[in-house]
């Protein structure tokens, strides 16, 4: 990954600032999911969202990280027309700044893309998280990941990787559920 002529400490500080800013002002966050703690206490069921786009199929996935308590529900609306496109992507949840920032950055990167493009980004982000701080050896992939490359520093800490991946796993699952719910032609 390019260091933009900045020292290691300066680059790390820039990454931390990007993550904190994305966590403070999260994109795509809406309130629609039941709180897990009150859901378990009351025995309540699921939340249900309908597609806000007429020609879309919704899918939803709830992800929970028992290690740190992060949780997110990701809602995706996938177009019925080919190539399938993620027309709407929102989330609800709470957790550490890493999970919240990763969700925010993911929404910015994935919303409006085709499912194939979104899954390519999913795989590239996974590869970045598996790099253990080394980053990607592919400038094109790094460019496609945009602001998500700031999570390279997170990949040095195995206990934090799941925080960064939480929303991405939810997006993949929500899109898969939307595709599976589409009427067979």
Image (cartoon, grey):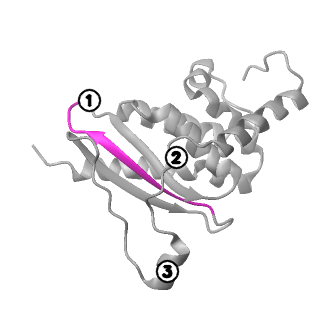
Q: Nearer the viewer, residue 28 or 105?
A: 28
Q: Nearer the viewer, mark 3 or mark 2?
A: 3
Image-quadrant location for residue 45: bottom left
User: What is the secondary structure assignment of the residue under circle 2?
Assistant: helix
Is disc 2 surrounded by few (<14), some (14 to 19) or many (20+) residues within 10 Å? many
* Tags 3 and 2 touching, CB below 8 Å: no
- Gap between marks 2 and 1, in whole Å? 21 Å
N-terminal of the pair, mark 2 or mark 1, is: 1
- Gap between marks 1 and 3, in whole Å? 39 Å
- Horizontal and vertical percent for residue 152? 71, 36
Is disc 3 surrounded by few (<14), some (14 to 19) or many (20+) residues within 10 Å? few
Would you name the residue on which mark 3 appears?
40
Instruction: Please say whether residue 76 is one of the residues in the magenta stretch.
Output: yes
In the rendered image, the quadrant that contains the C terminus is top left
Q: Is residue 124 above or below residue 164?
A: above
Q: Is residue 175 left or right of residue 7?
A: left
Q: Is residue 31 above or below residue 17?
A: below
What range is drawn magenta here? 70-83
Image-quadrant location for residue 17: top right
User: What is the secondary structure assignment of the residue under circle 1?
Assistant: loop
Image-quadrant location for residue 85: top left
* Tags 2 and 1 touching, CB below 8 Å: no
N-terminal of the pair, mark 3 or mark 2, is: 3
Indicate which disc residue 127 carries: none
User: What is the secondary structure assignment of the residue under circle 3?
Assistant: helix
Would you name the residue on which mark 2 appears?
168
- Gap between marks 3 and 2, in whole Å? 24 Å
Q: Main secondary structure of the magenta part?
A: strand
Would you name the residue on which mark 1 appears?
83
């Amino acid at each position: 990954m390019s260091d933009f002529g900045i020292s290691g400490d300066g680059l790390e500080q820039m990454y931390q600032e990007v993550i904190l800013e994305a966590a403070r002002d999260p994109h795509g966050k809406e309130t629609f999911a039941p709180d897990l703690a009150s859901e378990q206490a009351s025995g309540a069921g699921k939340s249900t969202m309908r597609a806000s786009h007429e020609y879309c199929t919704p899918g939803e996935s709830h992800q929970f990280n028992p290690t740190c308590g992060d949780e997110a529900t990701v809602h995706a609306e996938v177009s019925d027309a080919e190539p399938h496109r993620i027309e709407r992507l929102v989330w609800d949840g709470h957790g550490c700044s890493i999970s919240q920032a990763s969700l925010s950055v993911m929404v910015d990167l994935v919303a409006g893309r085709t499912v194939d493009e979104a899954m390519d980004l999913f795989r590239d982000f996974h590869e970045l998280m598996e790099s253990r701080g080394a980053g990607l050896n592919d400038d094109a992939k790094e460019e496609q990941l945009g602001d998500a490359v700031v999570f390279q520093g997170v990949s040095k800490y195995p206990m934090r990787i799941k925080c960064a991946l939480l929303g991405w796993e939810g997006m993949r699952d929500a899109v898969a559920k939307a595709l599976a719910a589409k009427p067979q032609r």
